[in-house]
Amino acid sequence: MITLSLPVYTPANSLKNWVPSLTYDIILNDTSIIEEINLRSGDTDFLKMYGGQVGYRIDQAFWNMGYATKACILLKPSAIQNGFSCLWITYNPENIGSRRVCEKIGATFIEIVDLPVDSDMYKRGESAVTSGY
């Protein structure tokens, strides 16, 4: 069983064009933190197209166990409470696991887009993302 911790609020960073976010630890069996999930509280075109309003990481030892899917489901009440009626999730098109998470939570595939060359994601070696909600 997983739960989400109380969120940590990160304010906007205008220098990087980042919106405020809430970060939750993903906790397994009330004891082990197996990574985190973020709710990015913004509605910018860049965020919807490239960065996503939801971001998550799962420790590799816990991949393919449904924890990312469950964390996304657990995040939904917070998203609704923060005024979202839909959320944009983006992922690398080669990331089959994230594609499956999006399918399991009922996200709709929108498109694959090339990243702008001046984005942090591109500078880290990504070249495209898949957009969905």
Image: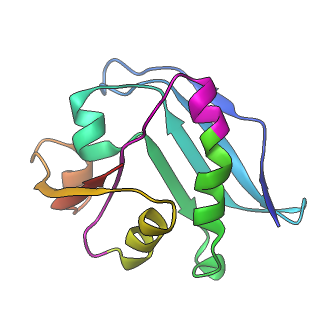
Q: Who's the residue at 26% across and 51% down the image?
A: 121
Q: Could you tell whether 130 is left or right of 64 in the image?
A: left
- Residue 67 location (% of width, % of height): 65, 68
Q: Could you tell whether 54 is left or right of 88 in the image?
A: right
Residue 81 shown in magenta: yes
- Residue 128 location (% of width, % of height): 17, 60
Q: Could you tell whether 111 is left or right of 101 in the image?
A: left
Q: Who's the residue at 34% across and 25% down the image?
A: 43
- Residue 109 location (% of width, % of height): 27, 59
Classify residue 49 by image quadrant: top left
Q: Is residue 110 above or below residue 95?
A: above
Classify residue 99 by image quadrant: bottom left
- Colouring scheme, one of rainbow, by chain, secondary structure, one colour: rainbow
From this viewpoint, which residue is outermost toward the right? Answer: 30
Q: Is residue 118 above or below residue 42?
A: below
Q: Who's the residue at 28% across and 65% down the image?
A: 92
Give the camera-side residue of 4 and 17. Answer: 4
Q: Is residue 11 above or below residue 115?
A: above
Chain part drawn in magenta:
77-94
- Residue 73 location (% of width, % of height): 62, 53
Q: Quadrant of the N terminus?
A: bottom right
Q: Who's the residue at 48% across and 24% down the image?
A: 20
Q: How many marks?
A: 0
Residue 85 shown in magenta: yes
Give the camera-side residue of 41 and 16. Answer: 41
